[in-house]
Every structure is written in structure tokens, then in C-alpha cells.
Amino acid sequence: MSKQYAGVILRVNPGSLAEELELTPGDKILSINGQNLRDIIDLSFAMADEEIDLLVEHPDGEQEMVSFDKDFDEELGVEFESAVFDGIRNCANHCYFCFVDMIAPNMRGSLSIKDDDYRLSFLYGNFVTMTNMGPNDFKRIEQFHLSPLYVSIQCMNPELRAQMLRCKGAAQIARQLDQLERAGADYHTQIVLCNGLNDGAELERSIREIVARRPHALSMAIVPVGITKFRDDPFPLKQFDATAAAKVIDEVEKWQRKLQQENGRTFIYLGDEFYFLAGREVPTTEFYDGFPQLDNGIGLTRSFINDWDAAAAKQPEPAVYDEPVYLDVVTGTAVSPVICQLAESVQNENLHIRIVPVENEHFGHTVNVSGLLTAHDILNKLKSLDGPRQGILIPESALRSGEDIFLDDMSLAEFAAQFPDARVEPVQGGRDYHQALTDWNSYHKNRSNETAYTWQSNAGYTKPVE
């Protein structure tokens, strides 16, 4: 008999089938029509039946069989504490560049979870190395048509990949990509580029071999390695400087131009940090082919600018401020020049905007994205500044998705209490930013209806979001 797992209900959606069945948070879904469930993938396929026998365990331990009829496409309407009921599959690697290993000590335990689970790759776009996958996993990918996936390539040189991941199985990357393709799965790819290690000739090889795997290979993202002050791995890593970043851009642009001429798609995209480091403008919208890796931070700056421009086109004239308005705009240091440039385009004699780039004291100054700022670093920076402030704009990426909690566990309410004379508002994207600056008196970011993460992963904090 197979082991029985349970999906623990976190939230019941109003007006849903689950509400009609009187399911409540804390109830556990044990099986559907006698089928044990490993994850929400199993649950989704089982719920496709029109006659359902749902085995539920209530918080008091009592089990109940709930039988009902439903439409073929009718969903249960719940969120679960975790999308995988049998536990998140952990990473088997010890990568030279693992960001989770560089997390500060004594932080929230969930930040140290090294997930490497192909199911989370399919469901949420997490990147996986595939080093912990076996034949049954590829069979399930084929059975349930789990596509696309997101694969951390790092490099296509098998010996170097095994070395970088400190895992002998990592050398099987080409064979495993073959297995994915035979299973009918397409995939996006990522390379965490380490200066002097998998760049140069190795990057050229990786690009060449992944490009040859089109159309199964859908895109390639190349992001620079990030290093915090807490890294204690003995392998020496160095970050890219302006010269090295410019060299990467020039080398990759040759491939980008070639691929654009072949079929009109860029296919390969560089993380925004390369352009910031090299002091170059981020590419145009057309360059990103519809932003297939936006959740990975690829093209985030261009998307932000686009959202700003779209909002500006709808509201060309800002609101009139009868009295002076003083706003502090908090940002990571990497994107601060863009944030400043947009702010300078707003013309209002009573509007006073102060851009506040915050150095990351918690992780170290080499970590420069807004999404990894802590409440304490932001507080310390703001309190060091004199002058009036009526509003504080903070990047919503610094808060946990669906919750008003910063990375260091301070709540947004606790943060706001430190500034009784100012209104604190999160800002997500260029549209919010434009509205907040041009109509501050009416701006309010309501996050109450946002969906929380239904699983906990370090990915929410390590993606290079702005």
C-alpha cells in the first residue's frame, strides 16, 4: 500500500466549491476517489472526475468522506500550505555559488530550504538542476505533461558542471535534457555566470549546445553570481566589475544578433545587473521576446519602465498639490539611477521627491537589489536623513508575497510605526510608482487580496528582483 500524504488547507476561497462543502483551514485532504495524493498535480488530475469521494481529516483528527458531484472543470477552490504534500525535494548539490549557503545565520529557517523539486519548477518557475531526478520522475513528467520546466544549466561541460555543483550526477546534464525532450517537455534555462569559471569559452560552448536544442529549449537567461558577506565556501569566487560585465554583454550580443537574424527571436537574455555594472542602457522591449523569464528578473527594469510609460500615457497631467508634498523613495542601489530618472520626469512645483538608495548592510554591499533589503537597513538609512517627509515608498519586492512582512521578519505595521508623521506605501511596478508620485493623496496599495505563497522556498528571496 502506498504511503498516504495530506494536503493541509491554508485558505478557502469565498464562493468556492470547498466553501459549499464546509471545508475550513486546517482540514487535510487525504485522498480523492481512493487515490493518494503527493501534490497538487495529483489533486488537479483527480478532481477532473465529475463524481468525487473526498477523504478529509479535520483538525480534531476525525476523518470524514465527503461525496459530491461537480462539473468537469470545476475546481475545489482552496489554497494549501504546501503545493507538495509529500515534502519539498531538497537539493543534492553543494554549489560553489549557492545563495542559500550565504544566508545570514539565525534567520528564518525557511530561508535555508534548498529546494530542487521539478514539480515546483513546473508550478512556480523554480529552477532545478535535475541531479536528484530518476526514471520515475521523467515518466511522471511525460504522464502529466509537465511542461515547461526551468533548468539550471550553469554550463554544458560535464566535468566543469560536476565540479561547480560538487555532484557527480551533474555531469549527466546532456543526457537528462535528452530525457526531458523524449518526455515531451520544453524548458527554459539559466546560467549563473561566475567570473573566470563558466564564462568565456565555457559560456560560448553552453550557448552553442543549448541553442542547438531549440525548439525544446525555449530561452536562456544568464545572470551574474551574487556573493554575500556570509559566504564561507573555500572556493574563490569573484564578482563581475564594469569591464568584465561589458565583455560578457559584447560576447552575448554576437549570439543575440545571429539568432534574431535567423528567426526574429533573441532567445538569450542577460540579467539587468550586467547592464547596470557596465553603465549601459537596458535593451528595448522587443529584445525580450515577450519577457519569458520576467519572474527570474530578466527584463524587469524594462518592464518597469514600460509600466511607467503606459501609466503616464493614460494620465499625462499629474494631480495638483496645493501644499508641498515630500516623498522618500526607497530603492536598491542597482536600479536607483532608473528610479531617479523617472522621478525627474514628473513636473510639479509642490512635489519634492528624494530617492533613497539603501546599501545592503545585512548581506553586504555587493548585494544591491531591492528585493533583498531588510527593514532594519531601510530604517537605518531613512533615520539618517534630515528634512520633512510625508510619504515613504518602499519596493513591494522587499515584502513576502501575500504578507506584509520584511525579510528580517519585521511587519510593515511595525516599520510604519517608526514614522508616525509619514504614510508608508509599498510600490510594485512602474504603474504604482507613477501613480504614487503623480497622485500621492489618492494612492494606496491594497495587498489584502494578494495570494500568499502556497509553499515556502528561498526562491522568493534569491530571485534578483528589483
Image: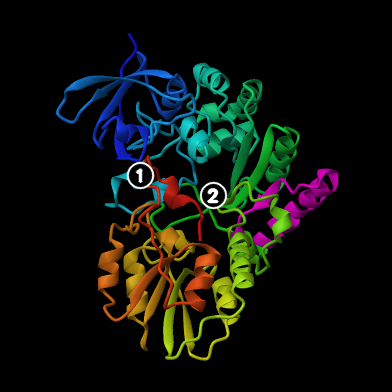
Q: Residue at x 58, y 85 (%)?
A: 347
Residue 314: % across, % down: 61, 70
The magenta segment is 244-272
Which amino acid lies under the numbered mark 1 shown in the image of this protein? Ser
The residue to which callout 2 is attached is 295
In terms of secondary structure, where does tag 2 sit?
helix
Residue 91: % across, % down: 43, 34
In terms of secondary structure, where does tag 1 sit?
helix
Q: Residue furthest right?
A: 261
Which amino acid lies under the numbered mark 2 shown in the image of this protein? Asp
In terms of depth relative to the viewer, which is nearer, 412 or 130? 412
Give the mark nearer the N terminus: 2 vs 1: 1
In terms of depth relative to the viewer, which is nearer, 78 or 332? 78
Residue 233 shows in this picture = no
Left/right of residue 465 with respect to residue 35 in the rendered view: right
Residue 112 marker: 1
Spatial separation of the CA atoms under disc 2 and disc 1? 20 Å
In the rendered image, residue 219 lying in the magenta stretch gets the answer: no
